[in-house]
Amino acid sequence: MSCYIELNNVSFSYPRSYPRGKVAINNVTLHLRQNEFTALTGPNGGGKTTLAKLAAGILKPSSGKVLICGKDSAKMTLGEIGKKIGYLFQNPQQQLFALTVAEDIAFSLELNGHDKGEIARKVKNMLELFQLTHLQDSSPFNLSHGEKGRLALAGIFINHLDYFILDEPTTGLDVERKNILSDIVKRFSGHGIGMLVISHDEGFVAQHAKRTIEMVEGEIVYDSSKDLRP
Amino acid sequence: MTAAKTLDPRTKLIMVLCLSSLAVFIQDIYVLGGVLLASFVISVILKGDLFPAFKQVKRLLLLIVIIAVIQSLFAPAGKTIITIGTFPLLTTGGLIRGAEFILRMAVIVVSATIVATSSSRETVQGLVQWKIPYEIAFMVSVGIRFLPMLTEEIRNVMLAIQLRGVELDKIPFRKKLKIYSYILTPIVVGTVIRAQKLATAMETRAFRAYPRRTSYMTLKMALPDYAIISFSILVSASVVVVYYM
Ligand SMILES: Nc1ncnc2c1ncn2[C@@H]1O[C@H](COP(=O)(O)OP(=O)(O)OP(=O)(O)O)[C@@H](O)[C@H]1O
Ligand SMILES: [Mg+2]
């Protein structure tokens, strides 16, 4: 499939926006293709997180349509979406639930009834990949910010999905950890897995992005795939 | 109209106290309706934020049915509407009880919007000037402040769990319990952590450094306040008296 997520004339305003009725996303049309690592940049409050949540079906558009794999996001349950798209929240704290690090990584596989041995093996892989093995029995809530970020990433990458949306995955990561993330991301996009990554990290974006989109005040002001300048 | 700005928070507290005592003491559905109407009108005049209150009450509507059935089963009264065999499943008496319950809840929810038209700082100050210890007044205001955040947090956690690819309605029953623990863990831990942070922040700002606090803000009641307070107490008292006579 060449076009994974499609936003058609999508507008969105938060129910409790200030001033009332202010649009956070203004009539955006955007096609995210799976074979194209896309970076989303722009100033604070530009609407990046909002756009990402719309693309992931977490928020439903006020007007316009979002199609995920050709299916209207408004008609999909979150669980259904979670089986297609992995989403990293800007604040990793928001997606940690379990009492230990290892349990948190295993959680979705366990609830979906995967085989115990398979879970143990995959969790071990993830712990090693994100250098969390020494922390596997500690509480997710006592980790440092960077460690929480890595744990949240491990928790979503353990599911083999076709598309990942990462909201500022590099914040709080040290140089070494950022390089590890870079390697993982590179490997994933090499396998044809789609990525939409929000980042202020120019180095990271320049290193990976095939396509760059910039958002200011709820509108796309730049899209490299449409850039016709020489 | 600047009624919301000028009315003393203590006046609002007394009004709300009157309204909710009435809601608790009165059993008559028509009087309860009147109490709800009164709270509603006051909230509108004070520009209370009624929209979220509506949604909360709407969520309780299912309870009408449950309470009505339970009341009908165990304390049948009035005409029987539905029966199973010889057992009355639904009686008019039960239905009225259910409706009364919702009216009571609605009064309390609407009352909350009346209090909320004053900032929590003002309400705390009002309580303090009533000689309620500042620590307790402050705790009350913190509690009120954090409660809506809690419901939002539960919603966020549910959302995040599903986004990890868990379809809640397809989980076998045995594992559903596990989900509750996954919902509660971050909420409880988060609440404790937030309380600790709040405590630290308060320490760094020298909360309770001195036994007595002076306050830049002082509230003074004006004539309308006294008028409204007397009126509220008088009316509620007479309603109760008439009702129980
Ligand atoms: N829950 C909310 N309720 C009301 N308004 C919101 C909410 N979340 C965001 N907004 C507003 O929507 C606009 C876009 O916010 P968004 O979070 O999408 O920005 P962003 O580009 O992700 O910024 P940042 O770089 O700081 O993460 C902002 O003006 C913000 O104030
Ligand atoms: Mg953001």
Image (tube, coloured by chain):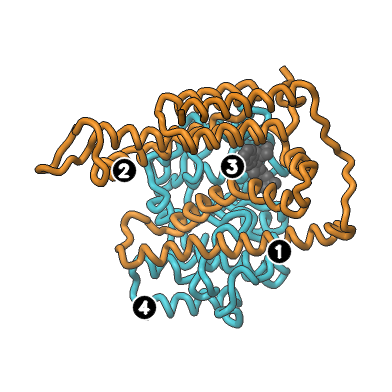
Chain colours: A cyan, B orange
Marks 3,2: beta carbons within 8 A: no
Residue A184 on image: x %, y %: 56, 67
Q: Position of residue A79 (x, y in %)?
A: 40, 53
Report the mark closest to the observer, 1 or 4: 1
Ligand 1 within 8 A of label 1's CB? no
Relative to B118, does residue A122 appear above or below in the rendering? below
**Cα–Cα gap, marks 1 and 4:** 38 Å
Q: Nearer the viewer, mark 3 or mark 2?
A: 2
Q: Are marks 1 and 2 in contact (CB under 8 Å)?
A: no
The residue lying at 61 percent from left, 61 percent from top is: B190
For residue B129, above or below residue A198: above
Horizontal arrangement in the rendering, residue A1 relative to residue A197 (left or right): left
Which of discs 1 and 2 lies nearer the camera? The answer is 2
Q: Amino acid at mark 3?
A: Thr
Q: Earlier in the sequence, mark 4 or mark 3?
A: 3
**Chain of the residue under label 1:** B
Q: What's under tag 4, amino acid-wise?
A: Lys
Q: Which residue is mark 2?
A: B66
Q: Are marks 1 and 4 in contact (CB under 8 Å)?
A: no
Q: Chain of mark 3?
A: A
Q: Position of residue A191 (x, y in %)?
A: 47, 63
Q: Report helix, strand or loop for mark 2.
A: helix
Label 1 sits on residue: B196
Q: Is mark 3 within 8 Å of ligand 1?
A: yes
Tags 1 and 4 on a common chain: no
Q: Which residue is the site of mark 4? A: A116
